[in-house]
Amino acid sequence: MKQGLGLRTYTVIYLLVLYGPIIILPLFAFNDATTVAFPLSGFTTKWFGQMLADANLRKALVNSLIVSLSTATLATTLGILAARSAVRYSWPGKGIVMGSIMVPLVLPEMIVAMALLVLLLAAGIKLSLFTIILGHVLIAMPFAVAILSSAFQSLDKSLEEAALDLGETGWSTFRLIVLPLVMPGILASFLITFTISIDEFIIANFLGGGEPVLSVFVFTAFRFPSTVPPVLALGTMLVAFSILLLTIAEYFRRRGVAKAGGKDTGGFL
Amino acid sequence: MTTPEEKPVMIEFRDVHKYYGDYHALRGINGTIRAGEFFSLLGPSGCGKTTLLRTIAGFEDISSGAVLIDGKSMQGVPANVRPTNMVFQSYAIFPHMSVAENVGFGLRKDPRSKPEKAKAVEEALEMVGLKGYGGRAAHALSGGQRQRVALARALILKPKVLLLDEPLSALDKKMREHMQVELIKLQRQVGITFILVTHDQEEALVMSDRIAVMFEGEIAQLADPETLYRRPNSKKVADFIGTMNFVPCEILSEAGGKVEVEAKGLGRVTLDGTQAPPARGETPVVGLRPETLTLLYDGQQASDRATEGVVDEVIYFGDMTYYDVYLGGTDVEVRLSMRNVPGRPILDVGSKVQVAWSPDALVLFR
């Protein structure tokens, strides 16, 4: 396999550049020194203690949880409606409407944030956690719709007809057949939109109106050397948490595809 | 056995039309299906047979006309309260449920107690040959087993009519033939009306009491399998069901229900009314099935009529041999089939042969 050597070297370098910095994060979070520099001085968990003792950080964490849970719930609920309607029914202007929902996927977040800020200020709406949630739902919706569309698509239409045929109503068919079969997709959508929201910075910074969320807090903390190591500890925890969430989401998505007897057409991971 | 004619009408179509936008999918369907009948809707894909089945189930609204089940108009009656149940082409087994949960799904609103329902489920499974499979996961079943589960699930509700949408098309040939016989037995056992949609003419002939052959949204012929095979009412039906030779002919006279024709290579033949379906303005031909033609071997005598011929092609099928033969020095070629029995050699291409046939086997299309 001599021919593949160049490509393999490239792959290894690519992965190192991609994941190296993330490995640095926990390395220094457990390092007993204020400055982030080699050589490492010794093992400590004190930065984690300091992080948890910080009242501002705790406030930011609670804010972030409020924003992310609300975003995930809203985006997934709206996503279910949009995906179901797009997959199952045809109506005039469907292409344009569904396209519009997906556009934030390719729009620079900066533009979305600025536009929303201008609009909200012009409308006289006070900036708050709620306005962050609005922005986050906008950027999380494409992901929710993509995941849920694939979940609804892998659902055989005749399953619903069979339930109707066996005496169920439209609603009980949805409850007994459709919902259980797309539930893995719903969970996956919830977890991914939650993850998108919790580490989003630009919109949170623009539309937060002084209410700090985690991402904004981290950005601020990095400007003072003394607060860097606790933030690294926080970062370590967030990375671990994100990986966990995405793994769970993908697990449910795959299980959903397998359960409905469909063919895996590829998700986000 | 009682003949279907004695039984009451179960389904009636009255001038049923169905449009999808501009597309005219059903073009004035009329006909009746009797109680306890094994009825097939047969036709090529896109002929409207599945659409027609779905109008009975209630999954398809009709644009005009009426569908009656057991004398009641189904106008505005939703699928979930119609006295019909369906076996879907994909079987539509609920993948997140066990076999027993699938079969018992329709009993959810049944007032019976849990043990009684469980007993009903077990009986239904036994009926389709899946006794003891109740605890299995539905998605772990084979194609044939899924089909049986779909059957049990539909039959447990004791519908007046069981609708089967190409139920055997996903099975391999052996399994399909096996299930054909099982379905016939099952239908006799439960005694309810079965309506089967199929594009497989052989399947329809094997299984049905009566068949409606459909082309382009219309019923071309509605008859029992034998009539359909022996006396098709049009060239199209004749061509769709089995193989038929078409021999050009000239109509000499027509009087008193008898038609006299001069068929190329066969000569002068007189046909009775059943052999001459209504004219359609087509070029006249007589049709005859391959098995109604016989090669005469040395010393054999034709019981009726015989014509000389030359073998043009020999197709060996193991149990049968097909011969393509030019008739009586003409360019008319017919295919005939001979059973390969001991003492009957396979003939060579170019052999001069005597072809025996009977005027009774002919059908005139014009």
Image (cartoon, coloured by chain):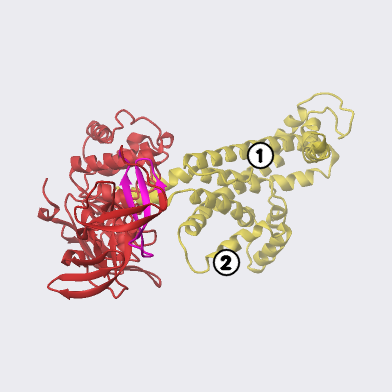
Chain colours: A yellow, B red
Instruction: Examine the residues drawn in magenta and state their main secondary structure.
Output: strand
Chain letter of the residue beneath label 1 in the structure image: A
Q: Secondary structure at mark 2?
A: helix
Q: Nearer the viewer, residue A7 or B224?
A: B224
Q: Secondary structure at mark 1?
A: helix
Q: What residue is pinned by disc 2?
A: A96
- The answer to which quarter of the image holds residue B116 is top left
Residue ID at (19%, 40%): B189
Q: Pinpoint residue B16: horizontal percent, then vertical percent.
A: 27, 67
* Residue at the outermost top position: A42
Q: From which residue to which does the magenta span run? A: B315-341
Ranked by sequence position, the earlier of labels 1 and 2 is: 2
Q: Is residue B90 left or right of residue B108?
A: right
Specify the amino acid type for callout 2: Ile
Q: Pinpoint residue B149: horizontal percent, then vertical percent.
A: 33, 38
Q: What residue is pinned by disc 1?
A: A242
Residue ID at (33%, 34%): B100
Specify the amino acid type for callout 1: Ser
Callouts 1 and 2 in the same chain: yes
